[in-house]
Amino acid sequence: MNTLVQRAYNFNAGPSALPLAVLEKAQQELIDFRGTGMSVMELSHRSAAYEEVHNNAIALLKELLSIPENYEVLFLQGGGSLQFSMVPMNFLKPGEKAGYIMSGSWSEKAFSEAKLFGDAYHVASTKEGQYRRVPQIDELKYNPTDAYIHLTSNNTIYGTQWKEFPDTGDVPLIADMSSDILSKPFDVSKFSLIYAGAQKNLGPSGVTVAIIRKDLLEKANPNIPAMLKYSTHSKNNSLYNTPPTFGIYMLGEVLNWIKETGGINELAKRNEEKAKLIYDAIDQSNGFYIGHAEVESRSLMNITFRVKDEELEKKFLTEAKNEGFIGVNGHRSVGGCRASTYNAVPFETCKAFSEFMVKFQNENR
Protein backbone atom coordinates (compact mmCIF):
# COMPACT_ATOMS: atom_id res chain seq x y z
CA MET A 1 0.00 0.00 0.00
CA ASN A 2 1.14 3.52 -0.81
CA THR A 3 0.77 5.11 2.62
CA LEU A 4 1.62 8.56 1.20
CA VAL A 5 -1.70 8.77 -0.65
CA GLN A 6 -4.41 10.69 1.22
CA ARG A 7 -7.78 9.22 0.26
CA ALA A 8 -10.73 11.61 0.08
CA TYR A 9 -13.91 11.25 2.11
CA ASN A 10 -15.78 10.26 -1.05
CA PHE A 11 -19.58 10.54 -0.93
CA ASN A 12 -20.03 10.94 -4.68
CA ALA A 13 -23.31 9.51 -5.96
CA GLY A 14 -21.68 7.99 -9.01
CA PRO A 15 -19.12 7.32 -10.24
CA SER A 16 -18.47 6.55 -6.62
CA ALA A 17 -15.92 5.09 -4.24
CA LEU A 18 -14.13 1.88 -5.16
CA PRO A 19 -12.48 -0.43 -2.61
CA LEU A 20 -8.89 0.65 -1.97
CA ALA A 21 -7.71 -2.96 -2.14
CA VAL A 22 -9.18 -3.27 -5.63
CA LEU A 23 -7.51 -0.07 -6.82
CA GLU A 24 -4.17 -1.23 -5.44
CA LYS A 25 -4.44 -4.60 -7.17
CA ALA A 26 -5.37 -2.91 -10.45
CA GLN A 27 -2.37 -0.62 -10.00
CA GLN A 28 -0.07 -3.63 -9.55
CA GLU A 29 -1.44 -5.39 -12.63
CA LEU A 30 -1.91 -2.32 -14.82
CA ILE A 31 1.18 -2.67 -17.03
CA ASP A 32 1.72 -6.43 -16.95
CA PHE A 33 -1.52 -8.35 -16.46
CA ARG A 34 -0.65 -11.74 -14.97
CA GLY A 35 2.45 -12.31 -17.05
CA THR A 36 0.96 -11.38 -20.43
CA GLY A 37 3.29 -8.41 -20.89
CA MET A 38 0.22 -6.29 -21.59
CA SER A 39 -2.32 -4.31 -19.64
CA VAL A 40 -5.77 -5.86 -19.42
CA MET A 41 -6.82 -2.84 -21.51
CA GLU A 42 -4.56 -4.10 -24.30
CA LEU A 43 -5.74 -7.71 -24.34
CA SER A 44 -7.90 -8.99 -27.16
CA HIS A 45 -11.42 -9.64 -25.94
CA ARG A 46 -11.12 -12.99 -27.75
CA SER A 47 -7.98 -14.02 -25.86
CA ALA A 48 -7.85 -16.77 -23.25
CA ALA A 49 -6.48 -14.32 -20.67
CA TYR A 50 -9.45 -11.98 -21.05
CA GLU A 51 -11.97 -14.82 -21.38
CA GLU A 52 -10.97 -15.98 -17.89
CA VAL A 53 -11.57 -12.48 -16.48
CA HIS A 54 -14.93 -12.26 -18.22
CA ASN A 55 -16.25 -15.66 -17.19
CA ASN A 56 -14.98 -15.36 -13.62
CA ALA A 57 -16.90 -12.10 -13.20
CA ILE A 58 -20.10 -13.77 -14.40
CA ALA A 59 -19.54 -16.77 -12.10
CA LEU A 60 -18.85 -14.55 -9.08
CA LEU A 61 -21.99 -12.50 -9.63
CA LYS A 62 -24.06 -15.68 -9.89
CA GLU A 63 -22.49 -16.97 -6.68
CA LEU A 64 -22.84 -13.77 -4.62
CA LEU A 65 -26.48 -13.17 -5.61
CA SER A 66 -27.46 -16.87 -5.66
CA ILE A 67 -28.73 -16.41 -9.21
CA PRO A 68 -30.77 -19.44 -10.31
CA GLU A 69 -29.72 -21.55 -13.30
CA ASN A 70 -32.53 -20.25 -15.51
CA TYR A 71 -31.01 -16.76 -15.67
CA GLU A 72 -28.38 -15.21 -17.93
CA VAL A 73 -25.85 -12.61 -16.77
CA LEU A 74 -25.02 -10.04 -19.44
CA PHE A 75 -22.47 -7.23 -19.61
CA LEU A 76 -23.89 -4.35 -21.65
CA GLN A 77 -23.02 -0.75 -22.45
CA GLY A 78 -24.99 2.49 -22.40
CA GLY A 79 -25.65 2.61 -18.67
CA GLY A 80 -29.00 2.31 -16.96
CA SER A 81 -30.30 5.04 -19.26
CA LEU A 82 -30.08 2.83 -22.35
CA GLN A 83 -31.93 0.13 -20.43
CA PHE A 84 -34.85 2.56 -20.10
CA SER A 85 -35.20 2.16 -23.88
CA MET A 86 -34.07 -1.45 -24.34
CA VAL A 87 -36.65 -2.82 -21.91
CA PRO A 88 -39.76 -1.55 -23.76
CA MET A 89 -38.09 -2.03 -27.16
CA ASN A 90 -37.68 -5.73 -26.38
CA PHE A 91 -40.73 -6.49 -24.27
CA LEU A 92 -43.54 -3.97 -24.87
CA LYS A 93 -45.36 -5.21 -27.95
CA PRO A 94 -48.32 -3.61 -29.78
CA GLY A 95 -51.58 -4.16 -27.92
CA GLU A 96 -49.82 -4.73 -24.58
CA LYS A 97 -49.42 -2.47 -21.54
CA ALA A 98 -46.47 -1.99 -19.21
CA GLY A 99 -46.84 -0.72 -15.65
CA TYR A 100 -44.31 1.64 -14.08
CA ILE A 101 -44.04 2.24 -10.33
CA MET A 102 -43.12 5.89 -9.90
CA SER A 103 -40.78 6.60 -7.00
CA GLY A 104 -38.38 9.24 -8.29
CA SER A 105 -36.58 10.87 -11.17
CA TRP A 106 -35.12 7.67 -12.61
CA SER A 107 -38.48 5.92 -12.76
CA GLU A 108 -39.82 9.03 -14.49
CA LYS A 109 -37.08 8.78 -17.11
CA ALA A 110 -37.73 5.06 -17.61
CA PHE A 111 -41.46 5.76 -18.01
CA SER A 112 -40.85 8.52 -20.55
CA GLU A 113 -38.79 6.17 -22.69
CA ALA A 114 -41.42 3.42 -22.49
CA LYS A 115 -44.08 5.83 -23.76
CA LEU A 116 -42.09 6.15 -26.99
CA PHE A 117 -42.57 2.45 -27.71
CA GLY A 118 -46.04 1.60 -26.46
CA ASP A 119 -48.75 1.84 -23.84
CA ALA A 120 -47.14 2.53 -20.46
CA TYR A 121 -49.03 3.63 -17.35
CA HIS A 122 -48.45 4.38 -13.65
CA VAL A 123 -48.99 1.44 -11.32
CA ALA A 124 -48.54 3.80 -8.35
CA SER A 125 -46.80 7.10 -7.67
CA THR A 126 -45.53 9.02 -4.66
CA LYS A 127 -44.72 12.17 -6.63
CA GLU A 128 -47.44 14.21 -4.87
CA GLY A 129 -45.58 13.64 -1.61
CA GLN A 130 -42.29 14.83 -3.17
CA TYR A 131 -41.10 11.25 -3.42
CA ARG A 132 -40.49 10.98 0.30
CA ARG A 133 -41.30 7.28 0.24
CA VAL A 134 -41.67 4.34 -2.10
CA PRO A 135 -45.22 3.09 -2.75
CA GLN A 136 -46.57 0.45 -0.42
CA ILE A 137 -47.23 -2.94 -1.93
CA ASP A 138 -50.99 -2.66 -1.34
CA GLU A 139 -51.02 0.59 -3.37
CA LEU A 140 -49.90 -1.17 -6.55
CA LYS A 141 -52.69 -1.48 -9.12
CA TYR A 142 -51.78 -3.38 -12.26
CA ASN A 143 -53.25 -5.76 -14.82
CA PRO A 144 -52.57 -9.51 -14.86
CA THR A 145 -52.07 -9.24 -18.63
CA ASP A 146 -49.36 -6.56 -18.45
CA ALA A 147 -46.20 -7.14 -20.46
CA TYR A 148 -44.19 -6.28 -17.35
CA ILE A 149 -44.03 -4.13 -14.20
CA HIS A 150 -41.01 -1.87 -13.72
CA LEU A 151 -39.60 -0.44 -10.48
CA THR A 152 -36.50 1.42 -9.32
CA SER A 153 -35.15 -0.30 -6.22
CA ASN A 154 -33.27 2.69 -4.78
CA ASN A 155 -33.68 6.37 -5.52
CA THR A 156 -30.38 8.21 -5.44
CA ILE A 157 -31.87 11.69 -5.72
CA TYR A 158 -34.56 11.40 -3.04
CA GLY A 159 -32.87 8.87 -0.76
CA THR A 160 -35.57 6.20 -0.68
CA GLN A 161 -35.30 2.43 -1.06
CA TRP A 162 -37.60 -0.57 -1.31
CA LYS A 163 -37.34 -2.75 1.79
CA GLU A 164 -39.61 -5.49 0.43
CA PHE A 165 -40.35 -6.20 -3.21
CA PRO A 166 -43.80 -7.04 -4.59
CA ASP A 167 -44.65 -10.49 -5.88
CA THR A 168 -46.23 -9.90 -9.28
CA GLY A 169 -46.94 -13.56 -10.02
CA ASP A 170 -47.10 -14.26 -13.76
CA VAL A 171 -46.44 -10.63 -14.69
CA PRO A 172 -42.69 -10.15 -15.26
CA LEU A 173 -41.11 -7.83 -12.69
CA ILE A 174 -38.23 -5.69 -13.97
CA ALA A 175 -35.99 -3.63 -11.69
CA ASP A 176 -33.44 -0.90 -12.10
CA MET A 177 -31.02 -1.73 -9.26
CA SER A 178 -28.23 0.58 -10.38
CA SER A 179 -27.70 2.18 -6.98
CA ASP A 180 -28.21 -0.65 -4.50
CA ILE A 181 -27.42 -3.98 -6.14
CA LEU A 182 -25.31 -6.17 -3.85
CA SER A 183 -25.93 -3.89 -0.87
CA LYS A 184 -28.33 -6.31 0.85
CA PRO A 185 -29.78 -9.77 0.21
CA PHE A 186 -32.83 -10.17 -2.02
CA ASP A 187 -34.54 -12.96 -3.95
CA VAL A 188 -33.49 -12.79 -7.60
CA SER A 189 -36.23 -15.23 -8.58
CA LYS A 190 -38.89 -12.55 -7.96
CA PHE A 191 -37.60 -10.71 -11.02
CA SER A 192 -37.58 -11.47 -14.72
CA LEU A 193 -34.96 -8.81 -15.42
CA ILE A 194 -32.61 -6.80 -13.20
CA TYR A 195 -30.29 -4.18 -14.62
CA ALA A 196 -27.66 -2.02 -12.96
CA GLY A 197 -25.07 0.49 -14.06
CA ALA A 198 -21.78 -0.53 -12.46
CA GLN A 199 -20.61 2.87 -11.25
CA LYS A 200 -22.08 2.79 -7.75
CA ASN A 201 -21.65 -0.67 -6.19
CA LEU A 202 -20.12 -2.84 -8.91
CA GLY A 203 -17.16 -1.03 -10.41
CA PRO A 204 -16.27 1.89 -12.68
CA SER A 205 -18.63 3.52 -15.15
CA GLY A 206 -18.97 1.93 -18.58
CA VAL A 207 -20.40 -1.48 -17.71
CA THR A 208 -24.06 -2.32 -17.21
CA VAL A 209 -25.06 -5.67 -15.73
CA ALA A 210 -28.30 -7.34 -16.79
CA ILE A 211 -29.64 -10.46 -15.07
CA ILE A 212 -32.41 -11.86 -17.24
CA ARG A 213 -34.61 -14.92 -16.97
CA LYS A 214 -34.39 -17.16 -20.02
CA ASP A 215 -38.16 -17.41 -20.53
CA LEU A 216 -38.38 -13.59 -20.81
CA LEU A 217 -35.60 -13.65 -23.42
CA GLU A 218 -37.73 -15.96 -25.52
CA LYS A 219 -40.59 -13.41 -25.56
CA ALA A 220 -38.51 -10.52 -26.88
CA ASN A 221 -39.34 -8.62 -30.04
CA PRO A 222 -37.07 -9.98 -32.82
CA ASN A 223 -37.50 -6.96 -35.10
CA ILE A 224 -35.07 -4.53 -33.51
CA PRO A 225 -31.39 -3.74 -34.17
CA ALA A 226 -28.96 -6.46 -33.13
CA MET A 227 -27.10 -4.39 -30.55
CA LEU A 228 -30.37 -3.56 -28.77
CA LYS A 229 -31.52 -7.19 -28.47
CA TYR A 230 -30.81 -8.94 -25.18
CA SER A 231 -30.72 -12.19 -27.13
CA THR A 232 -27.76 -10.96 -29.21
CA HIS A 233 -25.66 -10.55 -26.09
CA SER A 234 -26.97 -13.73 -24.48
CA LYS A 235 -26.06 -15.87 -27.51
CA ASN A 236 -22.58 -14.38 -27.62
CA ASN A 237 -21.72 -14.40 -23.89
CA SER A 238 -21.69 -10.57 -24.02
CA LEU A 239 -18.90 -10.72 -26.61
CA TYR A 240 -20.88 -9.84 -29.75
CA ASN A 241 -18.79 -6.69 -30.00
CA THR A 242 -15.82 -5.44 -28.00
CA PRO A 243 -16.99 -5.12 -24.40
CA PRO A 244 -15.58 -2.58 -21.88
CA THR A 245 -12.84 -5.01 -20.92
CA PHE A 246 -11.12 -2.94 -18.23
CA GLY A 247 -14.47 -2.12 -16.60
CA ILE A 248 -15.38 -5.82 -16.51
CA TYR A 249 -11.98 -6.65 -15.05
CA MET A 250 -12.55 -4.07 -12.32
CA LEU A 251 -16.09 -5.35 -11.73
CA GLY A 252 -14.68 -8.84 -11.23
CA GLU A 253 -12.16 -7.54 -8.72
CA VAL A 254 -14.90 -5.70 -6.81
CA LEU A 255 -16.86 -8.96 -6.70
CA ASN A 256 -13.76 -10.74 -5.38
CA TRP A 257 -13.48 -8.06 -2.70
CA ILE A 258 -17.13 -8.58 -1.73
CA LYS A 259 -16.59 -12.33 -1.45
CA GLU A 260 -13.46 -11.87 0.65
CA THR A 261 -15.27 -9.33 2.84
CA GLY A 262 -17.87 -11.93 3.76
CA GLY A 263 -20.42 -11.63 1.01
CA ILE A 264 -23.69 -9.80 0.72
CA ASN A 265 -24.88 -10.47 4.28
CA GLU A 266 -21.75 -8.91 5.75
CA LEU A 267 -22.07 -5.92 3.41
CA ALA A 268 -25.69 -5.44 4.48
CA LYS A 269 -24.62 -5.38 8.13
CA ARG A 270 -21.89 -2.84 7.41
CA ASN A 271 -24.23 -0.69 5.34
CA GLU A 272 -26.75 -0.58 8.18
CA GLU A 273 -24.03 0.51 10.60
CA LYS A 274 -22.67 3.19 8.27
CA ALA A 275 -26.07 4.69 7.47
CA LYS A 276 -27.08 4.68 11.15
CA LEU A 277 -24.19 6.99 12.01
CA ILE A 278 -25.51 9.70 9.68
CA TYR A 279 -29.22 9.12 10.29
CA ASP A 280 -28.57 9.38 14.03
CA ALA A 281 -26.93 12.78 13.48
CA ILE A 282 -30.08 13.89 11.64
CA ASP A 283 -32.58 12.39 14.10
CA GLN A 284 -30.82 13.71 17.19
CA SER A 285 -30.42 17.25 15.84
CA ASN A 286 -33.81 18.55 17.06
CA GLY A 287 -34.69 19.83 13.60
CA PHE A 288 -31.32 21.34 12.73
CA TYR A 289 -31.03 18.68 10.01
CA ILE A 290 -34.20 17.60 8.21
CA GLY A 291 -34.24 14.23 6.46
CA HIS A 292 -36.10 14.03 3.17
CA ALA A 293 -37.19 10.39 3.20
CA GLU A 294 -39.85 8.97 5.49
CA VAL A 295 -38.24 6.65 8.02
CA GLU A 296 -39.71 3.41 6.65
CA SER A 297 -38.38 4.20 3.15
CA ARG A 298 -34.93 5.47 4.07
CA SER A 299 -32.15 4.40 1.77
CA LEU A 300 -28.97 2.78 3.08
CA MET A 301 -27.15 4.02 -0.02
CA ASN A 302 -28.14 7.69 -0.36
CA ILE A 303 -28.90 9.78 2.72
CA THR A 304 -30.67 13.01 1.75
CA PHE A 305 -31.32 15.95 4.07
CA ARG A 306 -31.56 19.73 4.41
CA VAL A 307 -30.07 22.09 6.95
CA LYS A 308 -32.71 24.15 8.78
CA ASP A 309 -32.17 27.34 6.77
CA GLU A 310 -30.69 28.16 3.38
CA GLU A 311 -27.75 30.25 4.53
CA LEU A 312 -26.67 27.66 7.07
CA GLU A 313 -26.96 24.99 4.39
CA LYS A 314 -24.61 26.90 2.11
CA LYS A 315 -22.17 27.28 5.00
CA PHE A 316 -22.50 23.58 5.84
CA LEU A 317 -21.68 22.52 2.28
CA THR A 318 -18.73 24.91 2.08
CA GLU A 319 -17.24 23.74 5.37
CA ALA A 320 -17.86 20.09 4.51
CA LYS A 321 -15.88 20.54 1.31
CA ASN A 322 -13.11 22.33 3.19
CA GLU A 323 -12.93 19.40 5.61
CA GLY A 324 -12.42 16.99 2.70
CA PHE A 325 -15.94 15.60 2.29
CA ILE A 326 -16.53 15.20 -1.45
CA GLY A 327 -19.88 14.92 -3.21
CA VAL A 328 -22.12 16.08 -0.34
CA ASN A 329 -24.22 18.49 -2.42
CA GLY A 330 -27.66 17.16 -3.27
CA HIS A 331 -28.59 16.41 -6.87
CA ARG A 332 -28.79 19.55 -9.00
CA SER A 333 -32.54 18.99 -9.55
CA VAL A 334 -33.48 19.15 -5.85
CA GLY A 335 -30.59 20.76 -3.98
CA GLY A 336 -29.95 20.08 -0.31
CA CYS A 337 -27.36 17.62 0.97
CA ARG A 338 -26.66 13.98 0.22
CA ALA A 339 -24.21 11.41 1.52
CA SER A 340 -23.92 8.36 -0.72
CA THR A 341 -22.71 5.47 1.41
CA TYR A 342 -22.21 2.71 -1.14
CA ASN A 343 -20.54 -0.59 -0.35
CA ALA A 344 -16.98 0.68 -0.81
CA VAL A 345 -17.41 3.79 1.35
CA PRO A 346 -15.56 2.96 4.59
CA PHE A 347 -17.16 3.06 8.04
CA GLU A 348 -14.51 5.60 9.06
CA THR A 349 -15.65 8.00 6.32
CA CYS A 350 -19.24 7.87 7.56
CA LYS A 351 -18.11 8.26 11.18
CA ALA A 352 -16.04 11.32 10.31
CA PHE A 353 -18.98 12.89 8.49
CA SER A 354 -21.37 12.17 11.35
CA GLU A 355 -18.93 13.83 13.77
CA PHE A 356 -18.61 16.81 11.44
CA MET A 357 -22.41 17.16 11.34
CA VAL A 358 -22.63 17.20 15.14
CA LYS A 359 -19.75 19.66 15.40
CA PHE A 360 -21.29 21.98 12.80
CA GLN A 361 -24.61 21.94 14.62
CA ASN A 362 -22.99 22.75 17.94
CA GLU A 363 -21.12 25.68 16.41
CA ASN A 364 -24.15 27.09 14.56
CA ARG A 365 -27.06 26.80 16.95
Image: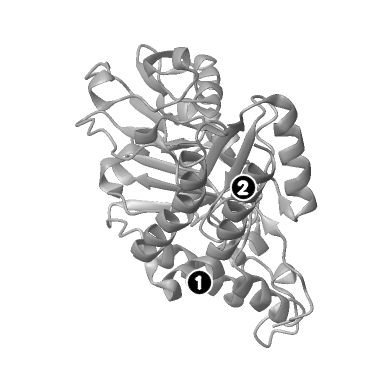
- Residue 357 is tagged as 2
Q: Which residue is drawn at 75% across and 70% down?
A: 42
Task: Provide residue 56's location: percent of width, then percent of height.
Answer: 47, 70
| Label 2, label 1: how far apart the Cα atoms are | 30 Å
Residue 223 seen in this snapshot: no
On screen, 37 above or below 71?
below
Closer to the chain start, of discs 2 and 1, is 1
Q: Specify the farthest residue to the bottom.
A: 35
Q: Which of 113 and 86 is in front in this view?
A: 113
- Residue 257 is tagged as 1
Task: Provide residue 343's location: percent of width, then percent of height.
Answer: 51, 58
Residue 156 shown left or right of residue 324 in the figure: left
Task: Provide residue 7's location: percent of width, then percent of height.
Answer: 72, 66
**In the picture, residue 249 is in which quadrant?**
bottom right
Dot 2, crowdedness within 10 Å: few (<14), some or many (≥20)? many
Residue 363 shown left or right of residue 252 in the figure: right
Task: Provide residue 268's location: percent of width, then percent of height.
Answer: 38, 57
Q: What element carries label 2?
A: helix
Q: Which of 319 and 296 is in front in this view?
A: 319
Dot 1, crowdedness within 10 Å: few (<14), some or many (≥20)? some
Residue 338 shown left or right of residue 170 in the figure: right
Looking at the rendered image, the quarter that the C terminus falls into is top right
Q: Which amino acid does label 2 sit on?
A: Met
